[in-house]
Image (cartoon, helix red, strand yellow):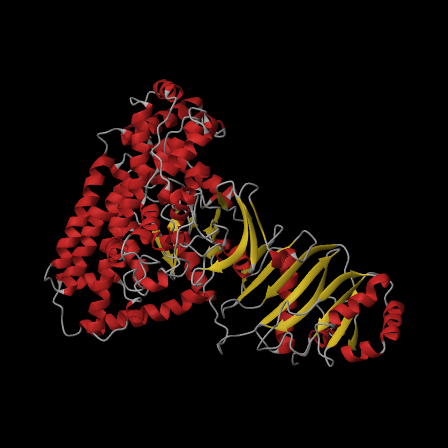
Amino acid sequence: MKFQTKARNLEILKPILKSAKILPLIIYKKKYIMSNLDFVMNEILSKFNTKLIVRSSSCLEDSSSSSHAGEFETLQSVTASNLKTALLDVASYLNDDDEIFIQPMLENIEFFAVCMSALNYANYITISYDESGDSKNLTNGDGLFRTAVILKSHVSKNPKFKKIICLINELENLYNNAFIDIEIAFSKNELYLLQVRPIVKNESKNLQDLTLIHDMIAKKFEKLSLKRPHLLGDKTIFGIMPDWNPAEILGLRPKRLAISLYKELITDNIWAYGRDNYGYKNLRSFPLMIDFAGLCYIDTRVSFNSFLPKSIGEKLGEKLVNHWLKKLENSPQNHDKIEFEVILSSYEFDIDEKLKDMDNFSADEKTKIKNSLKNLTIDIISPKSRFYKDLERINELDKRVKELKSSNLASIDKIYWLIEECKRYGTLSFAGIARAAFIATSVLNSIARVGAISQCEKNEFLNSLSTVSSSLARDINLLTKDDFLKIYGHLRVNTYDITSPRYDESFDEYFTKNSKITNQNVSKKKPFKLKNTKPLNTLLKEHGFNIDANELFEFLALAITSRESSKFIFTKALSLALNEIKQYALKLGISNDDAAFLDIKTLLGFYTTLESLSAKELILSNIAKNKAEFEITKSLNLPPLICNKDDIYEFILGENEPNFITQKSVQAMTASINDSDLNGKIVCINSADPGYDFIFSKGIAGLITAYGGANSHMAVRSNEFGLPAAIGVGEDRFNIYKKAKIITLDCLNKRIIV
C-alpha cells in the first residue's frame, strides 16, 4: 500500500484494519462543495445525526517530504446550525482540488495520543498522550500530557500501550514502512485510528535497532545496583540531574572530550575529595558519574552516601540512604531538587519539620541526624573551616594558570599541567566552595521560613550581592572591548565543548552594539544591612551557633558570591586547556570538530610515555572509535531517572515540576539562544552554564530551560536579576514551548501558558 491523502488513507484502511476502528467518513472536493453547498449539507446531515468534525485533506498534507501539520483547519463539535460556516472555514485554507471530509465527532474520549513508530531513526515507539479528553493539550503544552517511549522489542505491561503497538505493527506491515505517525483515541476502551501519515525524514537513514545496546545497559545497571563493600544502600537509582547534574552542565548527548574532561576534573575523584574535606563520608575512589553509551548519569546511591556526615554510624547511614532512595523513587519529579526535597545534607532552623516525615526513624535516630548535621554546618560556617582555605587555593590557581600560559612548555606538557592544576587548585576548591554556598542558601532560606528575617529582607540581601554575572552585565556597557575580553574572554557557551567559541573568539556573535542592560538590578546594588538583628541573634543562640547575625550574613554573602567567582576562575584553566588541545590537534591535521571526540586520557597518557611517531595514529583511532559510538548515542533514548531495569526499555516523560524563579508574570515572544534579537523575549535554552551569562546583557524578559535544578547556575542568576524563569521544565514540554510564538510565564501561579 502507498500513502494517499489524509481522508483517502482512512477510507482505504477502514474495511481492512483489524487492530483499531475508523469512524465513518464522507469525502468531497472543495470545488464540489462550493458549487453544491446545500446538497452537500443535506447529504451530510442525512448520513450523520450527531455532532460532527469537519477536517481538511489537502494534497500538501501528510506527504513523505512534508506534513504541513497545523497549516490547515479542523473544526470539532459541529452541529447542523453551524455546518455551513464550518465547511466554508475549512475550505478557505484549501485549493479547489483539495478535499474536505466529515466524520461523526468521537464522544467520551478518555485517552488521546499522537504516536510515532520511530524516534531519532531508532526502534522506539513514542506515545504522546493526554487523558483529559482535550486533544489540544498535546500541542499547546497545557494539561497533564505525558510521552511514553518504548523500545519496539519490549513487551509493554500497559494495556492501552499494547493495543497501540499492535496497531502500529499492523500499519507498518500494510504500508511496508517503519516510519509511521498516527493519531489515535480511546473511547469506552475502544481504540480508534484518527489519522495516519509517514514520518517526514530529513535523512535517508534506515531504522537502527538498539535492542542489544539496551540489553547491555540493563546488565550494567544490575551490576552497579548490587550491594558492595564500603557503600551503604540496597540498590541504586541513576539520574541525569542529581548532584553534579551532567544534563545541565554537559547537555544530554555530549561528545567524548567533554565527558572525559568532566570525569577527569570532577566526577571520577575530585567530587569525593571535596565532600570528604567538608566533614562528609569518605567516598574517594567511587566514580559519581556513569555513562551509558554516551548518556551521562549520576549514581544516586554514591551521591547519597557522600551527604552523610562522618559522625553518622553505618547502621543509621544505611537506613538513611535506603530511605532517601525510596523517597526519590516515589517522587521522581524531584530528581533535580535532591537536596531540597529528598535528602538532608545540612542543618536548617526548621529541620524538625522535615524530621517529622521520617516515620520509620526513632526519636533517638532523629536526634543523632539533627546533631550531626548541626555540627557539620557549624564547622563549615566557622572562620577556621576548609572553606576559607579553598578561597585561597582558588586564587592560587589564577597565578599558576598565568605561569603556564606564558611558559615554553610543549603542548602535551602544558595540557597535562593545566588539567592537573585545575584539579588540585580549581575544581577541588570549587567543589568545597559550592558546598559552602549551598549551605549558605539553605540557611538563608530557613531563617526566612522561621521568621528570623522577612522574605523581603531575604530578597534585599540577594539583590545586594555583586557576582560575576552582574559584573559582566555592567562591564559590557562600561569597558572597551579589549578590556572586557581581558576579564571575560575565556568564557564560552558549553564550558566543556571544544567546538564552542570563546567570547574572545566570537565577540560579535555573543554581544552586539545594542546589548544594553535594561534590568534594574545590575546598576543599583545597595549594601545590605539587617536592621533588626535581635530575632536572628536569638535564633542562632538557641540553636547553638557561636556567631551573631552580622557574622552570619558575612559568611552568606562570601559563600554565595564565591561560588560564581571560583567557577569563573577554574574555567580559565579549562578554557586554556581546550585551546591547547585545539592547537595540538591542528598541528596533526585534526579538525576541531574531530578533536571533540578525543578522550582526554589518551592525550594525558602521552605525558608519561614517549610521544612516538604513532601518536597521530593513536589519536585518530581513538577519535574514530568515539565517533562510531556517538552515532549510537545520538539515537539512544533513556529516561531522566532509571529506578529499575524495566525503565531502560519503557519510560514516561513529562512529569517534571519546573523550578519557578521570582513571583513575576511576563508575556512575550519566544527566542532561541542563536536569535540575533533577544531584547524583550523569553529565551529558551536546553541547559545553561556560566558561558551563557551574556544573555543577561540582552534585556531578556524571561528564561525557560529544559534542564536545571533549584540551585543551578541559571536559577541563581535569574533570582539575582529578578528575572522570571522556569528552570528544568523537562525535554517534552521544552520542545513545545520553544516552538510557540508567544508565551505567558506566570511564576506566581507556577504556570506556563502557550
Give the residue furthest to the left: 408
What's the residue at 15%, 58% (across, down)?
405
In the image, taking residue 271 as reference, residue 539 lies left or right, namely: right
Up-down relation of residue 420 to residue 674 (above or below):
above
Image coordinates of residue 90 in percent, x first then y, are: 74, 69
In the image, taking residue 14 as reference, residue 46 lies left or right, namely: right
Dividing the picture into quadrants, the one containing residue 631 is: bottom left
Front position in the image: 210 or 539: 539
Dividing the picture into quadrants, the one containing residue 324 is: top left
In the image, taking residue 189 as reference, residue 565 lies left or right, namely: left
Image coordinates of residue 222 in percent, x first then y, are: 42, 52
Up-down relation of residue 30 to residue 366 (above or below):
below
Image coordinates of residue 460 in percent, x first then y, are: 41, 34
Q: What is the count of numbered marks?
A: 0
What's the residue at 66%, 62% (across, down)?
163
In the image, taking residue 413 as reference, residue 187 lies left or right, namely: right
Front position in the image: 166 or 290: 290
Image coordinates of residue 11 in percent, x first then y, are: 75, 75
In which quadrant will I find the C terminus?
A: bottom right
Front position in the image: 403 or 430: 403
Dividing the picture into quadrants, the one containing residue 126 is: bottom right
Front position in the image: 183 or 589: 589
Q: Can you see residue 462?
A: yes
Q: Can you see residue 235?
A: no
In which quadrant will I find the N terminus?
A: bottom right
